[in-house]
Image (cartoon, rainbow, N blue to C red):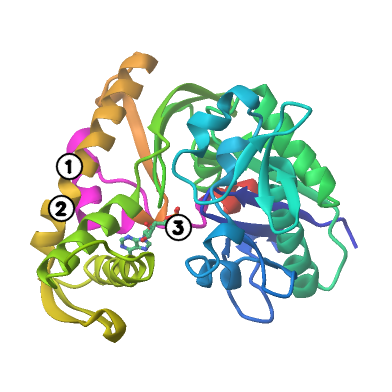
Amino acid sequence: MSRVVLGIDLGTTNSLAAVYREGKPTVVADPKTGSRVCPSVLQTAEDGRLVVGEEAKAARVERARDTLYSFKRFMGRGAADVEAQSKDVSYAVFAGADGVPRMRLGARAVSAPEASSLVLKELKRRAEAALGVPVEHAVVTVPAYFDDAARQATRDAATLAGLEALRIINEPTAACVAYGLGKKEDGVFAVYDFGGGTFDVSVLKVTDGVYRVLSTAGDVRLGGDDVDDALAKVFLREAAVRGEVSPRLFEAARTEAERVKTALSAAESATARVVVPEHGVRYERVVRRAELEALAGPFVDRTIKLVRRALKDADVSAADVSAVVLVGGSTRMPIVRRAVEKEFGKPGRLDLDPDEVVALGAA
Ligand code: AMP
């Protein structure tokens, strides 16, 4: 049998792998649970066991100090970045003797490449279980703005996981490849990537099948999570929660906000329920899509400002862009789709799942 190469989207929030088989790429699901994405979350359980993925994400509030997430932001960074990058994470980060940032994970201190390698190892394990063959090669995607150090850190993470990274490719390039853009004709394309915690937009030019990123703009602190937080605050205000909001209560409100937000991408209204008896909270109300859009609007506006900056930096106009690819779960929000269509004068492409398109392109 020919060798298997995994296409891996190593994401800040979620990671996934796809494989090219029988003439097309397919996402590899965990044969045990059927899940297609693996949350990029690590944890040490009470008994010291290392937990990766869904289970770690589920217990991240109770085990906040023993849970690592968003560690992708430390890839290729040095001691000087520790303070700025660790402001809004709940785990301890410090500079190691070698100047590389280290994160506390139970009794261990791990670097970002080590943390990433644990996610890659989990994807490798799931793929081997699903495919029934050993997997030793991968194409791993990185944000277009990653510098050489961050790309090397990604390569190192793959090596630590027992995977040889045949290529490190840009996420927006993978998204265009998944859609076959530039395969038959040259053109300028835009990739609008709105995830849970980050936003990126890239403008690419394809000439004779060669992809070049002309510009990229983004905000590493702008994502669907902001919409969840805004809606959760409305719930807590209306539930008349006084005094300090415990992490447990805020998490309950935020989890419900995300559920309602997601439902409102398909429905015009949805019922929110936040019930936390130990805090005396029993809250229920109907949320209309228009209300959610009023909260989401300012965040979407910020993404459009960044789109304009990327177009300007690439020295192209919206009309020069022949296709816009939508990536990331937050592009499922109708308000986002409308804003993108208005800005580019054409609807974004979404025949492929926006959460899977990068991995599919890598495969
Ligand atoms: P990603 O980082 O690409 O995995 O995207 C995750 C973000 O997409 C989270 O903020 C999710 O709440 C959001 N998301 C996922 N599905 C939907 C949906 N149907 N409607 C709105 N947001 C969604």
Q: Label 1 belongs to which residue?
A: 298
104 relative to 163 in the view: left or right? left
Foreground residue among 272 and 235: 235
Residue 78, x across and y down, in percent: 65, 25
Contact flag, marks 1 and 2 (Cβ < 8 Å): yes
Residue carrying label 2: 295
Separation (CA) of disc 3 from disc 1? 27 Å
Who is closer to the viewer here, 340 or 247?
A: 247
Q: Nearer the viewer, mark 2 or mark 3?
A: 2
Residue 105 is a magenta residue: no
- Going from the N terminus, do you reach mark 3 or mark 1 first? 1
Tell me the residue that label 3 is attached to: 352
Point out the stretch of residues depicted in magenta.
331-357
Residue placed at 27% from the left, 20% from the top? 317
Number of residues whose C-alpha sits closer than 10 Å to that of mark 1, classed few (under 14), some (14–19) or many (20 or more): few
Query: Relative to residue 261, is residue 159 drawn left or right?
Result: right
Mark 1 residue element: helix
The relative height of residue 288 versus residue 152 in the rendered view (above or below) is: below
Give the Cα separation between the discs numbered 2 and 3.
27 Å
